[in-house]
Structure formats: structure tokens, C-alpha cells
Image: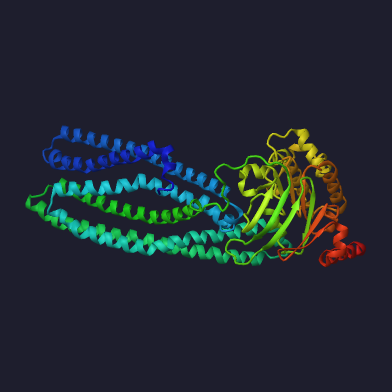
Amino acid sequence: MNKVIHLMKKYRIYAILSPILMILEVVADIVIPYLMSLIVDVGIANRDIDYIIKVGLLMILAALLGMTFGILSAHCGARAGYGFAAEIREETFKKVQSFSFANLDKFTVSSLITRLTNDCNTIGQVTMMSLRMAIRAPFLLLFALIMSFTINSSLARVFMVAIPVTVAVITIILYKARPLFLKLQSRVDRVNAVIQENLIGIRVEKSFNRQKYEEEKFKKRNDSLRDTALKAISLVISIMPLLNLIIYSTIIAVLWFGGQQVVLGTLGGGELISFITYITQVMISLMMISMFFMQFLRGSASMQRILEILNTESEIKEIPEPIKELRDGSIVFDNVSFIYPGSNEKTLKNISFKIDSGETLGIIGSTGSSKTTLVQLIPRLYDVTEGAVYVGGEDVRNYDIKALRDQVAFVLQKNTLFSGTIRENMKWGNENATDDEIITALKHAQAWEFVSKYKEGLDHRVEQGGDNFSGGQKQRLTIARALLKYPKILILDDSTSAVDMATDAKIQQVFKNELKDITTIIIAQRISSIQHADRIIVLHEGKIESMGDHETLLKTSPIYREIYESQQRGVIGE
């Protein structure tokens, strides 16, 4: 809790008031049985109507005050508990945003979603219960015991048996329940994972007619979650009949021994009634404590999962006084090697090359040759394992991360658009961009030709993930969004693969004529997309196999020549 307790600061007044009001409610609840015993032993015994009315009014007042304190305590507890959970959720979300790609590789998306929703909600519930039930139960137990011993100390000895038995039952059940609650959260993760995977790939699933297979996979994980939940709930449920058995056994014992004392005249009838009420309060308080600890176990599991995120340090570290501005878009790789976290094998091996500012570099190679990994080192999405990457003459590790990434526009393989409008999506590249600037960027990316046909223009709706656009349209929109950053370096990671060759050629022509000052790196599968580049790198198994312009590589690189000839045969075949 030391890691997150400062997040309660905003709600501390509610966190203070809730337990205070709860104690006042307990006092009111404790007073009522005592007043009831006075009505029986004094008012009714003496047939004093005025006394009965007077004490009865005091009981009503105590009940109203107790109800008021309870409502106010519940309100304050809810504000503090769920406010605290909201702050934890926000802090955790910020932490995730600061993660490097290496950090993100350690957590599945479904697990992060569960932690930010289900786990944070559980923490909110436990916090609220800690401010209310965890205060009410001990104080109710203490005050009810005091009143019981005050009424009749010999009769109160029944608790010497009832309380230890109750504590033993609760301890055994909690001990068995703890691992189940830990397992329950992981089962929720597994269900969320299959739901997310299925919904994202539902079009592929339908095209392959694999609904039955996915339903069976979901059923298997869903049944596993159900079975774990039932085991945990069964343990919780078992507490109730066991505690009720103890309560009723205690009441029977009190009625037996207390009844004898009433007959002998050493205990009043009203005192016996109030004593039984206090017995019920004592046992109910023990039941509440068991319920609290049951929820607390689940909350501790959730807090542990949240702390896994908050305690994860980003792999990307900034120096104390980083450089805030890039001089130009020149790039140097100096004997760079890279190993993914958790792996022992080098993905990139001894990579060295230089790109002058404003140059266009093409990168090609077979699948798995680490083309994407190479360019991800430039904006520090990952850090090099060996060697160094220089941008604008400086090691990228010396830059302010925001300043570096603001000047490196990256169009990823997976084109992601966000729900909203085209204008809102474009402003991810530059939030201050004017409509004219947006239209210019769309024209450069060859996207204006279809955007201009929409009745709403820039206000045309974008569905979640950009599902109302074709693959080629999404690629052109994401390129336009990157251009709006006015970067010094533009990286296109196979981002024209879904675009027809004629449109691709127009985009490359724009880069050559209109964006001459921008250093451009193009990863492509089609040689036609990069043959105009000043230089081309051929990657093979994480190494540079060859480097040169198109004509040179046709003569010197067997891999490049093989790719070119196979694509030429494909074009002729078409």
C-alpha cells in the first residue's frame, strides 16, 4: 500500500469521515438493546406508560441517528473507495503509457485490460469495506462484548467457547480460499484473452468458417473460470450455515442458563432479551469480519497484479538533462546488435551504416530478417543491446524521448485508426493542424482522392479500428497522419503493401519531389516501392547482406536479384 497510499490524498476527508460516522452508527446500534431492556424491566414491570414512551422515543431517535450515520458513512466510504480505485487506474494507465515495447512484451493486452478494470474495481470495493465493515465489525464486537459482560458476566462466558470456534472456522475457510481467489483472476485473464482475440479476428474466423472451433475454445476457458468461481463461492457460502449453527447454539445455551437465572430472579427478562441481541451482534460482527477478509484476499491478489505494473521500470531511461532538439535527420548505426528481452539469441548482428539527412533508404529482406526491429531502434521503441544509434549526430539515448519521437514519424505495419472523424485522426499527427494542412498531407499520401468524395469531408466518421475503410485507404490515412508531424525522419514499415502499384508509385514520387528534406526509410516487400531509393539495404537473418542502389544490388546481391526476378515473373504472369 505504501506504493499507492498517496493516491488517497484527494479523498482523505472522506476516508477520515467514513470510519468516524461508522463508529457513531455502532454506538447507536449498541444503545438500542439496552434501552429495550429498560422498557421491559422498568417500564413494563412497573406499568409506567410515560417511562415506556420516553425510552421508546429515545430508541427511535437512536435508530434514526444510526441510520443517518450509516448512510453518510456509506456515501463517504464509496467516494473514498471508488475514488481511490479511479486514481490507481489512472496511475496504472499512465505507467503503461510510459512502457517501452520491451515492457509491453511482458504483459498481454487482455491481462492489462483485466487489471485496469476488474482488479481496480476490486481494490475500490475492498477500500470501501476497509473504511466501513472493517471498522464496524471490530467496534460492534467490542461494544457488544462489553455490554454483555456488564449485564451478566457469568452468562457472558458462553463467548469463551463461541468466539474461538468461530475464529477457527473462519481461519480454515480463508486459508483454503486464498489460492482460489488468486487463480480466479488468472482465469479472468484467460477468458478476456480469447474474447479479445476472437473479436479482433472475427472476420477471419467467419471467412474460414471456424465459429464452432472458437466457441469450443471459449467454452473451455469459460467453464474453467466458472468452476474456479464456484469453488471459491462454495467456500464463502459454507461460512454462513456454520456461523448460523454457532449463533443458534450460543443462543440456546444462553436461553437455557439465562432462563434459569430469570426464574431465580438474578437476571431480568429484559436483560435476557438484550443479552441475546448482543450475542447476535457479536456473532454477526464475526461474520462481517470473515466476509471482509474473504474480500480482502481477493483485493490483495488484485493489488499484487496492479503493483506488478507500477513496480515495472521502463526499459527506456532518460539521462538527467536530455537534448531537446534534433539537429537534422541524419542516422548512423554503429556496430548495433539487439537481443529481445528474455531471449539469448541476437536478432540484429553488428549492423553498421549511415544515412545523410534528406536521403531515402529502402530496406528489404525475407520474412523474419528483422527489418522492423532495425527501424524501431531509431525512435527508441527498443534500446540497442550493443553499439549505438545516432540521430542528428547524437546518440538517441541522449535525447528527450518526447522530442525524439516528435521528430520521427513512424507508420507501423498494423494501421491503426481511432473512432472519431478523419480530422480527429489526422490531428494525432499535429493537434494544431489546420484543415488546409490536413488536406495537403492527404494529397501527399494520395488519400484526398477518396476523402474528398465523402459528403462530410474531413468530418467523415471513422469506426473503431477504421473498419469502414479498406486496407489501402487506412494505409494512406496513416501516412498522411505521419506527414502532419512535419518530421525530420519518416519511417514507413511496409505501409503501402495494400496500395495498388500505380498509387504506390505516386506516393514515392511525392516523397522524392515534395519531401526532399525528410530522411525517409521505407521497408517493403515489393522492390517497386524502394527501387527509387538512394540506397537499399538487404537484410538476411539479422545481418546486412548487401547495400547499394537498385542497379548495383541487381549485380552484387543474389538475394535482391532473386526477389526482383520472382516479382518480375509475377508481374508478367499477371
- Horizontal and vertical percent position of residue 466: 71, 48
Q: In the visual, does 518 lie left or right of 344? A: right
Pick the front one: 150 or 356: 356
Pick the front one: 121 or 413: 413
Q: In the visual, does 268 lie left or right of 84? A: left
Residue at image location 15% in from the left, 49% down from the top:
149
Residue at image location 27% in from the left, 42% down from the top:
26
- Horizontal and vertical percent position of residue 112: 55, 54
Toward the right, the furthest residue is 572
Determine which quarter of the picture holds residue 419: top right
Determine which quarter of the picture holds residue 33: top left
Placement of the C terminus among the 4 image quadrants = bottom right
- Horizontal and vertical percent position of residue 487: 73, 42
Pick the front one: 316 or 247: 316
Residue at image location 53% in from the left, 65% down from the top:
223
Residue at image location 29% in from the left, 58% down from the top:
244
Residue 544 shows in the view: yes
